[in-house]
Amino acid sequence: MKVRCPSCGRLYSSIIPPTCSCGEPLKVSYDYESVDVSPWRKRKPGVWRYRELLPGVEQIISLKEGGTPLLRAKLGEELGFNVFIKDETRNPTGSFRDRLTTVAVSYGLSHARNGFVVASNGNAAASLAAYAARAGRPAYAVVPKLVEQGKLNQIVAFGAKLIRYGESVDEGISYAEGLADGKGLYNVTPESNLIGLEGQKTLAFELWEELNPTHVLVPTGSGSNLYGIYKGFVELREIGVIEEIPRLVAVQAERCSPIASEVLGVEPRVEPTKALGLYVKNPVMKELALEAIRESGGTAVMVGEDELDLGQRLLAGEGVFAEYASAVVVPALLKLAEEGYFERDDRIALIATSSGLKGHYSEARERFSVGGTKLDILRLLGERVMYGYEIWEALEKPLKYQAVYQHLRELESLGLIEESHRKGRRIYYRLTEKGRRFLETLSE
């Protein structure tokens, strides 16, 4: 492995920054002419199977990451295309970030004098917490205020120090860099660690061995995974095992689409989305992601909030429970198929990046927190539309009727009830579809 600035020629050999001191972006390269891929098939599946194209390390810190299943999608048969799901939810901590972390932590051991740090919207932080625990080193996880509880649970369970900072991961990146400098920590933040990205590119190697796809649909937040996959395919072309790179498709939520909007030539939006793993307002790797799309002849797709549940349900129908940030690839596939983007003999890979057990926690939380009076109110509204005073009378409980309105507001904020209509000053309430599903789960 070598890292030399293409502009000023400076050579880096230990701590590898994302950009040279002269401002030029850096890239990790290898002696591609000497790489022999024939030993790969004799080794066990996993990230370190491809060590000829990974940084050299003295000690490998591994939880048996990589080698994830590639499943033929039933949905593809219905659409008339060859569609496959690369199930990254099966990695040790439930996400694709384990590929990055095993390489970054293994390489960074000698530089992590006082431990490791990462800025993350959840998955990379949970992953670092696990691998740092495995390595016996402290870990600091800088995560935004908007993050799923399931990921926070992982971080705490593995013993990392949790630091809440900013609304989105963008704000935490520079904070993590400051911690790394001030506390002598090795920074494995994906946007700040070129070495870790070398682990993520092994997704491309596995896809080549299993499928040799023509198209790869990638959920895209910061752009690091998209670029990592692109770099992997570029290296496969460099060593002569493929002639063409598959078309890479960046999939983003409409509400937060700084990369996709530029590809599609529309006004970008940077608002919070249910797909919190994709909520990256100012992606550091935007230019590299755009390079990957452009050089591969790919495109981008934006997915609406109302399509996220559909994507999650259809993936679940394939036996894969993925978080919203992963499920975006399914509605993106449907849109591209409807537009005639694919040919019948194409081989299409969907990257399911992270488990739904990390993100889909709200209904489970409500199932245990909504009880007592709130549950009685839901059951009353399950029978008919009612207004507040009417509900208070029907409850027949020793509580003030103003308390009923507080319960109603809280149930409304949870999305379990909504206003049906008004008659004079009376506001009538009814169950939402989510509220009906909630009651049904309790009766099962």
Image: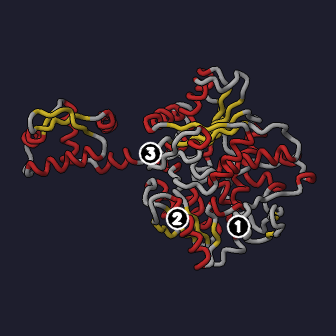
Decide which of 201, 110 is in the foreground and name it. Answer: 201
| The disc label shown at residue 17, or none | 1
Residue lying at 32% horizontally and 49% vertically, measured from the top left: 368
Look at the numbered disc 3 and give the secondary structure of its residue. Answer: loop
Quick one: quadrant of the N terminus?
Answer: bottom right
Per the image, the residue denoted by label 3 is: 274
Look at the numbered disc 1 and give the secondary structure of its residue. Answer: loop
Q: Residue 322, relative to residue 279: is it above or below? A: above
What's the distance in space between the residues labelled 2 and 1, CA to CA? 17 Å
Per the image, the residue denoted by label 2 is: 172
Q: Relative to residue 43, is residue 148 drawn left or right?
A: left
**Which quadrant of the figure has residue 6?**
bottom right
Residue type at tag 1: Pro
Quick one: quadrant of the C terminus?
Answer: top left
Q: Residue 263, relative to residue 24: is it above or below? A: above
Q: Relative to residue 151, is residue 346 drawn left or right?
A: right
Relative image position of residue 18 (x, y in whole percent): 69, 63
Q: Residue 355, relative to residue 116: is it above or below? A: above
| The disc label shown at residue 54, or none | none
Point out the tag, 3 or 1, that comes first from the N-terminus.
Answer: 1
Point out the tag, 2 or 1, that comes first from the N-terminus.
Answer: 1
- Badge 2 crowding class, 10 Å Cα cut-off, few under 14, some 14 to 19, many 20 or more, is many
Residue type at tag 2: Gly
Q: Relative to residue 342, is residue 208 drawn left or right?
A: right
Residue type at tag 3: Lys
